Amino acid sequence: MSTMRSFTPRQRMLAAYRGECPDRVPVAPEFWYYLPARLLGLDMIEFQQVPHWQALQQTFRHYACEGWGIVAPGKGAAEAEWQTETVQLNERQYDQRTRVRTPRGELTARQRLDKDEPAWAVERFIKDLERDWAIYEPLALPDPASLDWQPVEEALAAVGEDYLLEVYGGLPFTDFIGGVREGGFEQMVFDLQEHRDFLLGLRERYIAWLREVIREAFARTSAAAVFIGCGWACGSLLGPRLWRFWDRPVLAAAAAAAHEAGGLIHVHYHGRCRETLDDFADLELDCVCPFERPPGGDITDLREVRRRLRRRVTMNGNVHTVETLIRGTPSDVVREVLEILEAWEGQPRLIVGTGDQVGRETPDENLHVMIETVKRYGAYG
């Protein structure tokens, strides 16, 4: 008679993050915008009005699987007057303009709202890097002690054991500056060379701030893990050399702060990651996702991944969201899931997930097959 206890979805995820064996391997498709919006019958503009953690909760319950999501604290105190104006462009799109006035000056930004796609930036706050950053920095780095943690704790309580809700800690440094820089990624890469000393100083202030935010997260909420996102700070776009110089120190500081507080850290790292697998292990990042297959990523040898992570990092991901889940058949899904399970040979530190978020075109049949295959063949012990 088996003595293996039953785990909740949240407990399975946490066991995987800690390198322990739950009853079975967790299966956590990345449901982010498209699938939850489809499930709730909302367009992307309507979807933005629903608390994201709540939409994910309904989605994970519907598919009866594990998962993760994020929730952020309320903004800290800052002397600023925000004005937002939304102008309809056509039946499906709106232009949203934001103006912020502070004692140091004024900044403007615009984003496009679209019923079919998540919003994107049209104009960013930082036009002249050093001049505008002096205005923006108090908004970007508010006193961590002034952040409002009550919404986080309320969301954690509401989610309970349904999935692993993590506190959003922040971004790697290049995403932090590039996300608000006019010209985006391309201009940010030039800035790294042309404003090197200024950005090195800013990075040190950002690291100090991020450490304090993570400490506050664990001190003032019941969260078990923090999350560090990623847009451009990866091997595919920034490249390993610039990533190691500009972003690795931020992740090192974030991981140390989380572990010192007795918590866990989850890092999102898009695209190619084979050259940085050893970095993940050295930093002891508790979980990294999504370990994408080609052409978006470069993960072709899962046993190499397992070996190089050295049982220090949990791999979350690897089921191809396009070729397998959207274009593939149920038998293709089964084959890919079994490849992942067999590569880990019953060892812990595995979550079967997806190579970034699941597309809206994904057949439900393929999602159900992915989840049920892990439940059937992913048992430990």
Image (cartoon, helix red, strand yellow):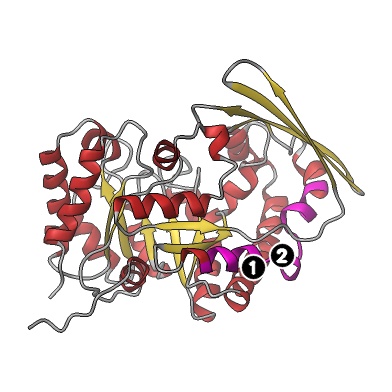
Is 277 drawn above or below residue 331 in the view shown?
below
What is the crowding at mark 1: few (fewer than 14 residues within 10 Å), some, or many (at least 20)?
A: many
Q: Is residue 333 left or right of residue 103?
A: left
Residues 300 and 242: in front is 300
Residue contact between numbered discs 2 and 1, judged by CB atoms under 8 Å: yes
Residue 105 placement: quadrant: top right
Residue at mark 2 to residue at mark 1: CA–CA distance: 9 Å
The quadrant of the rendering that contains the C terminus is: bottom left
Residue 370 colored magenta? no
The residue at 58%/48% (across/down) is 174
| Of labels 2 and 1, the one closer to you | 2
Residue 147 colored magenta? yes
Q: Give the residues in magenta.
A: 135-157
Q: Is residue 5 left or right of residue 205?
A: left
Residue 160 placement: quadrant: bottom left
| Residue named by callout 2 | 147
The residue type indicated by label 1 comes to Val
Sequence-wise first label, 2 or 1: 2
Residue 76 placement: quadrant: bottom right
Secondary-structure class at tag 1: helix
The residue at 61%/78% (across/down) is 219
| Residue named by callout 1 | 213
The percent position of residue 252, horizontal first and vertical second, equals 51, 67
- Residue 229 visible in image: no
The percent position of residue 161, horizontal first and vertical second, equals 40, 68
The percent position of residue 61, horizontal first and vertical second, equals 35, 55
Q: Is residue 345 left or right of residue 120?
A: left
The percent position of residue 367, horizontal first and vertical second, equals 25, 44
Q: Which mark is residue 273?
A: none
Residues 82 and 202: in front is 82
What is the residue that sits farthest to the left in this orientation? Answer: 1
User: Magenta stretch mostly in which secondary structure?
Assistant: helix
